Image (cartoon, rainbow, N blue to C red):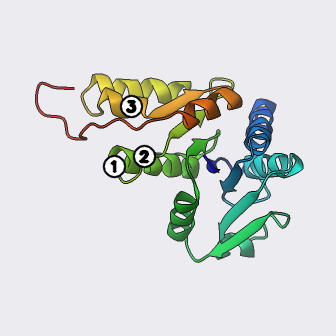
Amino acid sequence: MRAVCVYCGSNAGVREDYGVLARALGTEIARRGMGLIYGGARVGLMGQVADAALAAGGRVVGIIPQSLVDKEIAHSGLTESHIVGSMHERKRMMADLSDGFVALPGGIGTLEEIFEMWTWAQLGYHAKPCALIDTAGYWTGLAAFLDHQVQEGFVRAPHREMLMIDDDPARLLDRMESYEAPVVTKWIKAGER
């Protein structure tokens, strides 16, 4: 992988663990010589993952809509910045520039972004790895719900397994680098899972 897209909160959350994880992930991405692709903000976990990658000598590319630049939350010290017209343009450019996708703790936007990339992978639009990186059990409830979807016949087990979850940045990136997308159809017929 040459570049990893990281989705995360524009807030820092209530636990210092979230910032520790964001900084560790940014540092590990840079240490491996990978580029960091992210949403271009200087605030919250977004700013922390970017600053850590930059401090470790990494290449950081931010993609941010003009509306957020106007709110003065754009990071001014990135290797490369792209200002786009919409969230759709932002997500498309992030996807095009990235070889894998990781979600740190975050809110609604973080969920929407990683779920869209996971959906595209499920549909075969790309074969790039998708992952959640966890700390303090942030993703535990979501993981249980996703497993419930498999049990209830709405998601195939191989598709569920496409969304990796780990709590260690180095181990997660190792898993992502060795990822091979499963070949399985999306649609479930009556009586099969």
Which residue of the protein is positioned furthest toward the right in this rendering?
55
Label 1 neighbourhood size at 10 Å, few (<14), some (14-19), many (20+)? some
Query: For the point 25% across and 41% down, which residue is it?
Result: 186
Residue at numbered disc 2: 127
Is the residue 193 above or below the residue 113 in the image? above
Q: What element carries label 3?
A: helix
Residue at numbered disc 3: 160
Residue at numbered disc 1: 124
Q: How far apart are marks 2 and 1 (CA)?
A: 7 Å
Q: Is mark 1 on a helix, strand or loop?
A: loop
Query: For the point 66% across and 59% down, which residue is it?
Result: 39
Query: For the point 70% across and 52% down, which residue is it?
Result: 36
Q: Which amino acid does label 3 sit on?
A: Arg
Label 2 neighbourhood size at 10 Å, few (<14), some (14-19), many (20+)? many
In terms of image quadrants, where is residue 161? top left
Tell me: 115 left or right of 72: left
Numbered-mark total: 3
Q: How far apart are marks 3 and 1 (CA)?
A: 14 Å
